[in-house]
Amino acid sequence: MSATARPNRQAPRLAVLLAAEAPVGVVLRRGPTKLVQVIIWNRETDKFRLGPWFKGRIFADRSDVSPDGRHLIYFAMGGVAWAIPATGGTWTAISTLPSLKADALWGQGDTWGGGGVFTSNNSFWLNADENTFLIHDNSGLRRDTIPPASPRLLRKGWVCSNSTEPVDCIYSKLLCKGWFLRKLAKDSGYELEQPGIVKLTFSAWEWAEWDRDRLVWTEHGCLYTAKPGAQKLSPACMLFDFNE
């Protein structure tokens, strides 16, 4: 089915984390509002493994998957009725995928700090502040005290084309055949451009990334793929419909 042929309807919100060294993706499907499901994506076979449901919210922009696709570090907030009391309602955890069970757990109690990134398969950096407190750590992973030298997107091959301040950046990424993928302002979608030749705007795209030799993106609760060609994309192929 063509991506543009999908009818407008209330769709789940999708966030995707890709492992850097393994063909593993983690899809965070949010919907209804207070429920998130973790889904493991085998990017070689495009098969999907439905994982656990979580009552609350997982902040994808403060979460990360280890390069080998084995572990997830995530920042979460539980509603009043189901928050883990010891955490103060928000926390950072490290789990072994596909589980969300915390091998390591830090309470936060607010949304100012929290979350983290993997610095290798065996190490991580925690976005901690004075309110972060350790509850337990049985992960066997090393905690780095020095933050990564560059923001997450820059380490994934994106560049900031308009500003030295991360909050104001318009990020772009060189794909193939002279195509650039550009992430527009928050919730405004993406652009594909061959400079001086053609520019395509996709306002419905929630997330887009280059996966080895193909473009992948989400819109209207579905995950699609296509390949850039001469001045246009190949027909979109739906990999999975998360609406059902």
Image: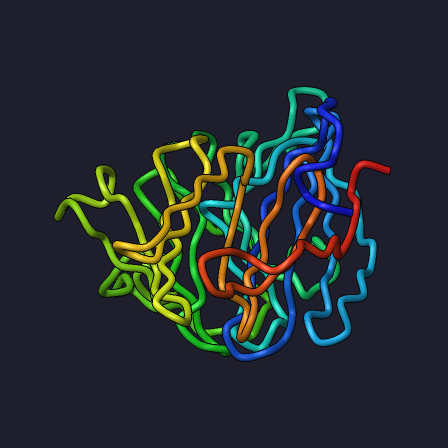
What is the x, y in percent for residue 91? 53, 41
Q: Is residue 104 visible?
A: no
Compared to 71, does 181 lie above or below?
A: above
Compared to 228, does 82 lie above or below?
A: above
Q: Is residue 205 left or right of residue 102?
A: left
What colouring method underlies this structural image?
rainbow
Q: Is residue 137 left or right of residue 123?
A: right
Q: Is residue 67 left or right of residue 198?
A: right
Q: Quadrant of residue 26?
A: bottom right
Judging depth in this view, the residue of 172 and 129 nearest the camera is: 172
What is the x, y in percent for residue 28? 66, 46
What is the x, y in percent for residue 29? 70, 41
Q: Quadrant of residue 124?
A: bottom left
Compared to 167, does 103 lie above or below?
A: below
Q: Residue at x 72, y 46 (%)?
A: 2
Judging depth in this view, the residue of 11 and 147 nearest the camera is: 11
Furthest residue in direction right, as rendered:
244
Judging depth in this view, the residue of 144 and 12 nearest the camera is: 12
Judging depth in this view, the residue of 171 and 237 nearest the camera is: 237
What is the x, y in percent for residue 105? 56, 52
Q: Residue at x 58, y 33 (%)?
A: 77
Q: Is residue 61 visible?
A: yes
Q: Quadrant of the C terminus?
A: top right
